[in-house]
Image (spheres, helix red, strand yellow):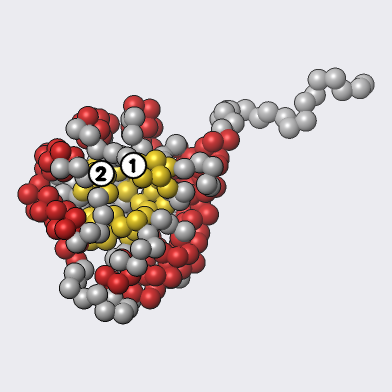
Amino acid sequence: MSSDPLKIGPFELTSRLFIGTGKYKDVDETRRAIEASGAEVVTVAIRRINLEDRSAGSMMELVQSGRWHILPNTAGCTTADEAVRTLRLARELGIGSMVKLEVIGDLATLYPDNEQTLEAAKVLVKEGFTVLPYCIDDPIVCRKLEDVGCAAVMPLAAPIGSGLGIRNPYNLRIILERAQVPVIVDAGVGTASDAAVAMELGCHGVLMNTAVALAKDPVLMATAMRDALIAGRRAYLAGRIPRRLYASASSPTSGLIE
């Protein structure tokens, strides 16, 4: 949908699907799924890949091919200091200035630590990063992250990797109503219908990994997710009909000849 670009800070994107690189069986499957998804932004966990291996067929070779915007993320970080150091390293490697900030506060739910996320966001914004923070679907947290200069907010739909889909569409609606920056659903998507619902609500994009990587056919699921985001976005722009308690005839009865 080139006539409907997504603008995040200085970046302008055609695809609204952001895709991860973890959990695939190998680098080749990763590449094929990314290609099928049509995504322009690919996120990489800096602390979970071998940064020194740049040989043919390695993850770093794929990342540095120049085919995608690379979104380095701070998966595995539990403090603001860890997250900031990790993204400074990514910048030194030349991977990118647009970054996904993720500071985990609970290892069972993988929910983010709001306080540490906000602290890290302040530092990273001041250092010139385009910051996309993973956060709870809390309108107050999203507002505070926007206020410190984050280029987007990324509220979860459900816990990371759970596949539960959007558990609280009402919170997302409040966030969307108030946010002046793009809202990208991050975490919890399980299948294409979940992605379509997020877009129909008015979300500006969806980031996913597990739903594609652990599908029985990751490449086919990546294609389904691509199509779901496009359909959901178009439905949102078209404007759905109001919900009614009673029927409304498709063929009006007024003017019938007796």
Residue 224, image x, y percentages: 50, 59
Asked which quadrant contains residue 143, the reply is: top left
Q: Nearer the viewer, mark 2 or mark 1?
A: 1
| Depicted 2 relative to depicted 57: above or below | above
Query: Circles 2 and 1: CB distance less than 8 Å?
Result: yes
Quadrant (top left/top right/bottom left/bottom right) for the C terminus: top right
Residue 66 vs residue 247, the one in the foreground: 66
Residue 74, image x, y percentages: 18, 55
Q: Residues within 10 Å of mark 2 (few under 14, many from 20)?
A: many
Residue 127, image x, y percentages: 15, 43
| Depicted 61 relative to depicted 113: above or below | below
Residue 10 is labelled as 1
Label 2, label 1: how many angstroms apart (C-alpha)? 8 Å
Q: Earlier in the sequence, mark 2 or mark 1?
A: 1
Taking the spot 53% from the left edge, 54% from the top edge, the residue there is: 227
Q: Does residue 25 appear anywhere in the picture?
A: no
Horizontal side, residue 29 vs residue 45: left or right? right
Taking the spot 39% from the left edge, 73% from the top edge, the residue there is: 29
Taking the spot 15% from the left edge, 38% from the top edge, the residue there is: 126
Mark 1 residue type? Pro
- Badge 2 element: strand
**Residue identifier under label 2:** 130
Asked which quadrant contains residue 153, the reply is: top left
Mark 2 residue type? Thr
- Badge 1 element: loop
Residue ranking furthest to the right: 258
Residue 161 vs residue 132, the one in the foreground: 132
| Depicted 110 relative to depicted 22: above or below | above
Residue 222, image x, y percentages: 45, 62
Residue 216 is labelled as none
Horizontal side, residue 158 vs residue 102: left or right? right
